[in-house]
Image (tube, coloured by chain):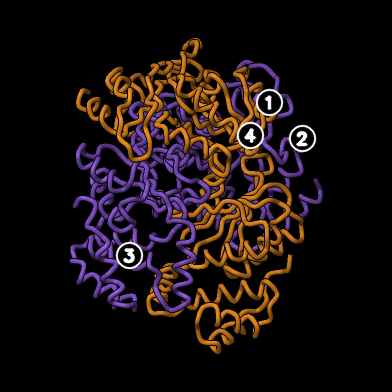
Chain colours: A purple, B orange
Amino acid sequence: MPALAATALRCLWLQAAPVQQLTSLRAFQAAPRVGCSLQQRWGRPCATAAAAAASGGGDGAASAAVDLGSEPRSLPQPPAADEPLAPGLYVVSTPIGNLEDITLRALRVLRSATLVLAEDTRHTRQLLTHFGISTPLHSFHQHNERQKEGLVLRQLRQGAAIALVSDAGTPAINDPGADLVAAAAAEGLPVIPVPGASAVLAGLVASGLPTRQFLYCGFTAPKASARQKQFAALATQEATLVFYVSPHSLLAALGDAAAVLGPGRRCCLARELTKRHEELWRGTLQEAAQEFTERGPRGEFVLLVEGAPAGSAAAAGAAAGGGEAGEAEIVAALRAAMAAGEPPSSAARSVARQLGVNKKLCYALSLGLQPEGPEP
Amino acid sequence: MPALAATALRCLWLQAAPVQQLTSLRAFQAAPRVGCSLQQRWGRPCATAAAAAASGGGDGAASAAVDLGSEPRSLPQPPAADEPLAPGLYVVSTPIGNLEDITLRALRVLRSATLVLAEDTRHTRQLLTHFGISTPLHSFHQHNERQKEGLVLRQLRQGAAIALVSDAGTPAINDPGADLVAAAAAEGLPVIPVPGASAVLAGLVASGLPTRQFLYCGFTAPKASARQKQFAALATQEATLVFYVSPHSLLAALGDAAAVLGPGRRCCLARELTKRHEELWRGTLQEAAQEFTERGPRGEFVLLVEGAPAGSAAAAGAAAGGGEAGEAEIVAALRAAMAAGEPPSSAARSVARQLGVNKKLCYALSLGLQPEGPEP
């Protein structure tokens, strides 16, 4: 593909993971080693050596649809030794509970990488040992991230194939790895995603909630006031909301969510995902607060909350354009104030002042808001 | 665990995928068969038979952290026949390009399921054949979804283990499967996510853009006016934006995004993810529009766009509260109008009327907006 190769030479082009043709569960053809660009930065075009890879080995494997290999019917063959990996930073997803949730490529990359960067080396050591993998492990966590980043980038520049993993799931989301990926990307070093398990998507697709749009919000804020603001800012968001919630803040988070987003919003609490006691609890936010207050929260949770009704955002926007806060926004602000302990009359006064809307309207709306959802 | 079992009997509790202890790449201990609840609905507590599963086989495999099995050092053993799967709807992620991106559990579930529901049976047949799997395939796509749903639910009620796959990646996101999952969840039938590859996360973690929050927006709207509205509604969104873009609308989408969100926003175009010619192109929206106009778009794209600067949403909210649209909102609306072909003066008039803001301010702001980004 000379045209493509020429384009690649003069543009921001990153060749990453060459497709592996898999001929059996255990025998993989290995990746051709490709060069890598060392100087690419955001928005600054430069040459990359990826063109070499693009011009070689064009066997039609890169089709528009899922590539099913040129010999899909080949039978299992004896295990082949893994050939060296192409240089780059491999962002490797690992299981979130069930050890079977690892991909064939993740195993190969972990086996063949120069080294593996792990959040907790003891933890990842167990995973690697389980699969008979003895690749050297180096710790890379939020406390040593800054000092190690330079070292890792230097090794990447020298052509190392480095795997980045987190304790569970897809790394570089809420992990120290994100900054490393950004730094590597800024230098034009190849970053190769090796997709796999993630609690966000596992929870979402099994929740039964709409999946057309979803907003991943990270962990719920640990402090009550920050958390109430966090929810209030999402009151008219129509996408399904996805949060991580630690067990010790679950009850408070559910109480605040019910108070601010409304007690009747549907939600799903995904607990122990992919493990033996995997649980997908479904109900309203108010029911969730009651349920988990009764039984006590255990384990890490993914909290999925139905988005606001269609038109909420537009209504809020139109209200903003018309110089008036929308009813949804007023209600959200009232709920936040009342959740913080203000009585309806006082909440109405402060919200009216804060949003520049009619005090009587606020008071009327506040009366309709029963203090629902148990206090955490 | 009698306490847990008792809780399970009276609450919305869904036992799903029992953890498999994996002793080698190919020898898996199979799942104990568990009963399933047939009557669970949103927010309506009922008994489930999951307690039986919860009370049996409590061998400590379900620990709080990643479960690494009780015998992590066991060596590969001869393949064991797969035991039957627990009943339920298994939402199974499949590769998005590289066939190695399939998990060990996905292979076992596809092999052991009663049947596999596939968007395109010919496509999935190739995948299964590649892995030597001969489970019966049934088509389940947007055109027969309604008529098949009842049939599938009936089989699930009778205890079938049904795997749902899409053509590529994680099903039930932008797929017909979402409604089936919602229907199964509404009946309290077990829904078991089998996580794996997804283009959304693969693109995100390799993009180098912030991952702390992200909003998956689905496909960009096919019509220009709808697409400009879609972007305008996201102008102050601080989360990283993730879109799917089909090749024939890429240029128009990039032009609109540059016009509405601002030409200088950083973005990443992920193309041919996990395939041989995987590409992560990074630059600004304006550069992206130029680049792909020159080389012509090929393949499916994931478009990732940096969120608005921190404080944008709060500023817009405060402006709304104060009865005035924020500057960001005015600028977004002006850009949308100008992208649709209106000259600055006319755009300023219509935006001022539309948002109820000062006409001169709009005109001043419109003058600063050069018609950047090439026309698609």
Q: Are marks 2 and 4 in contact (CB under 8 Å)?
A: no
Numbered disc 3: secondary structure = helix
Q: Say the numbered circle drawn on residue B75.
A: none
Q: How many numbered tags mark residues here?
A: 4
* Within-10-Å neighbours for mark 2: few <14, some 14–19, many 20+: few
Q: Which mark is residue B144?
A: 4
**Quadrant hosting residue A22:** top right
**Chain label for disc 1:** B
The amino acid type found where label 3 is placed reads Val
Eye-nearest disc, 2 or 4: 4
Badge 3 vs badge 1, beta-carbon distance below 8 Å: no
Q: Are marks 1 and 2 on the same chain?
A: no
Which one is closest to the eye, mark 2 or mark 3? 3
**Residue at left offset 21%, top offset 62%:** A340
For mark 1, what is the residue? B126
Badge 3 density bin: few <14, some 14–19, many ≥20, Cα 10 Å: many
Circle 1: element type: helix
Give how far apart the Cα atoms at labels 2 and 4 are.
36 Å
> Visible in this render: residue B98?
no
Of B149 and A320, nearer the camera is: B149
- Chain letter of disc 3? A
Q: Is residue A216 above or below residue A293?
A: below
Q: Answer with mark 2 or mark 3, whichever residue precedes in sequence.
A: 2
Q: Position of residue B228 (x, y in %)?
A: 62, 65
Pinpoint residue A334: horizontal percent, then vertical percent.
28, 66
Nearer-the-camera pick, A92 or B326: B326
Residue B143 to residue A345: above or below:
above
* Tag 2 secondary structure: loop
Q: Is residue A265 visible?
A: yes
Residue of label 3: A331
Do discs 3 and 1 share a chain? no
Q: What's the amino acid at mark 2?
A: Asp
